Amino acid sequence: MTIVKRKLVHTEVMSIRWGDMDAMGHVNNTIYFRYMEQARISWFEAIGARSAVKGQGPVIVNASCTFIKQLVYPGEVEIKTYVGTIGRSSLETYLELRPSYDAAKIYAEGAAKVVWVDYAKEKSVPLPDAIRHLIEH
């Protein structure tokens, strides 16, 4: 098994809303992906990735989530975003979700592969040097 070195790049806290829950009384599984999506977007905005190169930017090519414990309302969820392997045009992201009412425990773990693309050509392109520098340092 290969151990991937991960670097913490962003932390965000979001409210768990009443409407995030489903009929079973816990946060619906699709909402975990929304929490992770928002954390990634906030990180991309913080480093200027969404406007780094006109017509280019990040897209998600796969995403996963391991549900460890049920999140419930009320509370907040802290999402920590990490970067792992960085390639020519891609990077691996990993996320941990912890609720405010049990902050010592991870309730879900997620991952997503991000690829930098030219939107018009619909093809991957190298990560811009400025973005690579921000991620690596």
Image (tube, rainbow, N blue to C red):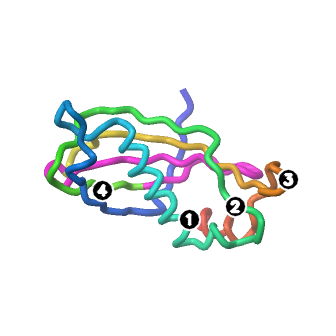
Choose mark 2 or mark 4, whichever is in front.
2
Question: Distance between the Cα atoms at labels 1 and 4?
Answer: 17 Å
The numbered mark, 2 or 3, whose residue comes first in the sequence reads: 2
Residue 78's disc number:
4
Decide: marks 1, 2 in contact (CB < 8 A)?
A: yes
Chief secondary structure of the magenta span? strand
Residue 32 position within the rendered picture, expressed as x and y whole percent measured from the top left: 37, 43
Q: CA distance from mark 4 to mark 3?
A: 36 Å
Amino acid type, label 4: Glu
Q: Check disc 2 and report its element: helix, strand or loop.
A: strand
Residue with the mark numbered 1: 44
Of labels 4 and 3, earlier in sequence is 4
- Of badges 3 and 1, nearer the viewer stands 3
Mark positioned earlier in the residue sequence (1 or 2): 1
The quarter of the rendered structure image containing the N terminus is top right
Q: Residue flagged by tag 1: what amino acid is it?
A: Phe
Disc 2 marks which amino acid? Gly
Residue on which disc 2 sits: 57
Magenta region, residue range: 81-102
**What amino acid type is highlighted by mark number 3?**
Lys
Residue 126, position as x, y percentages in the image: 80, 57
User: Disc 3 on helix, strand or loop?
Assistant: loop
Q: Quadrant of the C terminus?
A: bottom right
Alpha-carbon distance for marks 3 and 1? Answer: 21 Å
Which of the two labelled residues, at mark 1 and mark 4, occupies the earlier sequence position? Answer: 1
**Is-magenta flag for residue 90?**
yes
* Badge number at residue 121: 3
Give the secondary structure at mark 4.
strand
Q: CA distance from mark 2 to mark 3?
A: 12 Å
Q: Could you tell me which residue is drawn at 75 percent across and 62 percent down?
A: 56
Quarter-of-image position of residue 78: bottom left
